[in-house]
Amino acid sequence: MTPPTTYMVAIEYREPTYEERVGKKPEPYRWTFQITATTEAEASQAALREFRTIERLSGVGWTRNIVSINVRRTPY
């Protein structure tokens, strides 16, 4: 059995409807999640679930399009 590891998962995204109204940002927005999981794939999926939950709870009307998901193991 693989022991759990802590990962930092950065999800970069764009808000095209919002950017259409106020102007496009040069860099995408980014949320970073600290996830404990047994694999990078599991960490990525858990972070994506958290991202979608926060997106639903935010109450804004524009969409968030994910442009990248970066997973890295933490050194501790």
Image (cartoon, rainbow, N blue to C red):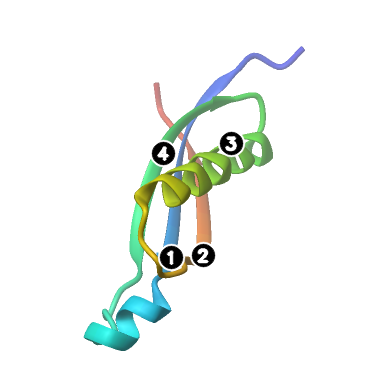
Element class at badge 2: strand
Crowding near the residue tagged with mark 2, few <14, some 14–19, many ≥20 C-alpha atoms within 10 Å: some
Which residue occupies 63% across, 41% down? 45
* Residue carrying label 4: 33
| Residue type highlighted by circle 1 | Tyr
Crowding near the residue tagged with mark 1, few <14, some 14–19, many ≥20 C-alpha atoms within 10 Å: some
The picture places residue 41, in percent across and down from the top left corner, at 67, 41
N-term mark: 3 or 2: 3
Q: How far is the residue under mark 4 from the one under mark 3?
A: 9 Å
Q: Which labelled disc corresponds to residue 13? A: 1
Q: How far is the residue under mark 2 from the one under mark 1?
A: 4 Å
Identify the image quadrant of the C terminus.
top left
| Residue type highlighted by circle 4 | Phe
Which residue occupies 46% across, 66% down? 64
* Residue carrying label 3: 46
The picture places residue 26, in percent across and down from the top left corner, at 27, 81
Q: Which labelled disc corresponds to residue 66? A: 2
N-term mark: 1 or 4: 1
N-term mark: 2 or 4: 4
